[in-house]
Amino acid sequence: MKQRVLVTAGASGIGREIVRAFADNGATVFVCDIDEEGLGRLAQEIPGLVTTVCDMADRQDIGRMVARSVEAMGGLDVLVNNAGIAGPTVPVEAIDPDDWDKVVSVNLTGTFDVTRLAIPHLKKSPAGVIIVMSSAAGRFGYPNRASYAATKWGLIGFTKTLAMELGEHGIRANAILPGTVEGPRIQRVFEGRAQATGRPVEEIKQVSMANQSLKALVDPRDIAALAVFLASDSAKTISGQALPIDGDIQRLS
Ligand SMILES: NC(=O)c1ccc[n+]([C@@H]2O[C@H](COP(=O)([O-])OP(=O)(O)OC[C@H]3O[C@@H](n4cnc5c(N)ncnc54)[C@H](O)[C@@H]3O)[C@@H](O)[C@H]2O)c1
């Protein structure tokens, strides 16, 4: 079966690797993002890739995007809810409520909106799959990142509930919890933490590795390979799981 896959926020970072991996695996892929230029570059790289601009904080945009994806691919088998923003790096009492709302609207409500609209189409698939991108911040407390951690824990509850509601329709739902991933985003996170604590960036990096058994950043291509596996027939009895891919992180600090 040639899978029809929708990936949110896939113009760069982990999402882009997921798009590439599914396309390499022979799937038809539809990708949305807020970054039009990034989508254009990816469309040039991957023949047959369909793209659309969508703000994951905008419910109407999401409605149009999901409808367009189903129309373009003639249905939907795999939804990869990858979109997620980092939010502020400050203690709870210093969080600007507008920043809190933005993180909740993209990470949690955006994922709900896409999934809600995708479910009727996934029910028509012979093997519907939902993948949700949580984080190690979805299994630990995360000082100075409360809005991010709260949404990533929320996504676990959402995923486990989806798995229970949709199992009878043959739809599986699982969450991936990446740790510290190689790329420009983590550099920004390290810099934000350095600013919040007044410590040098290099020290922040070392401290972050000290809390994990394997002293290595996660390769985003490995996360993409995990997503492809979770969507494959070999994972046909895996549902409702929260799968860390993080070098065995023991705590976030
Ligand atoms: N990078 C990490 O270390 C890491 C670790 C754990 C979990 N994650 C999660 O993985 C997912 C992808 O992370 P990443 O590091 O690749 O992200 P990223 O910061 O590289 O951004 C990925 C894409 O999101 C798009 N985007 C941003 N705001 C958007 C919006 N409102 N609407 C639509 N698109 C938008 C950007 O244009 C970009 O192309 C997120 O859910 C993130 O929370 C990342």
Image: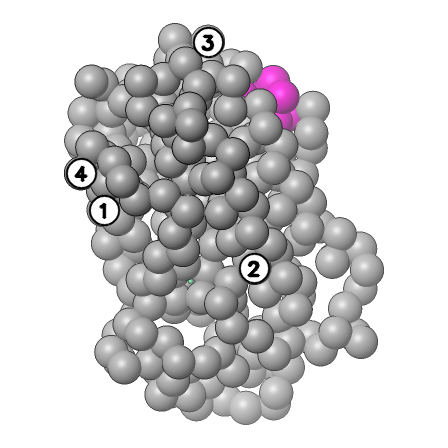
Label 4 Cα crowd, 10 Å radius (few <14 / some 14-19 / many 20+): few
Q: Marks 1 and 4, how far apart in space? A: 13 Å
| Distance of label 3 from label 1 (alpha carbons) | 27 Å
Q: Nearer the viewer, residue 23 or 187?
A: 23
Instruction: Give the Cα separation between the discs numbered 4 and 3.
Output: 28 Å
Place of residue 50 in the rendered image (x, y in percent of width and height, measured from the top left): 39, 20
- Mark 1 closeness class: few <14, some 14–19, many ≥20 residues within 10 Å: some
Q: Secondary structure at mark 2?
A: helix
- N-terminal label among 1 and 4: 1
Q: Earlier in the sequence, mark 2 or mark 3?
A: 3
Q: Does the CB distance between marks 3 and 1 fall below 8 Å? A: no
Residue occupied by mark 3: 71
Q: Are marks 1 and 2 in contact (CB under 8 Å)?
A: no
Tag of residue 234:
4
Q: Amino acid at mark 4?
A: Ser
- In front: mark 4 or mark 2? 4
Verify CB contact (< 8 Å) between mark 1 and mark 4.
Answer: no
Residues under labels 1 and 2: Cα distance? Answer: 23 Å
In magenta segment, residue 4: no
- The amino acid beneath tag 1 is Ala
Bin the neighbour count of mark 3 within 10 Å (Cα to Cα): few under 14, some 14-19, many 20 and up.
few
- Measure the C-alpha gap from mark 2 to mark 3: 32 Å
Q: Nearer the viewer, residue 40 or 105?
A: 105
Question: For the residue labelled by badge 3, is the local secondary structure a helix, a strand or a loop?
Answer: helix
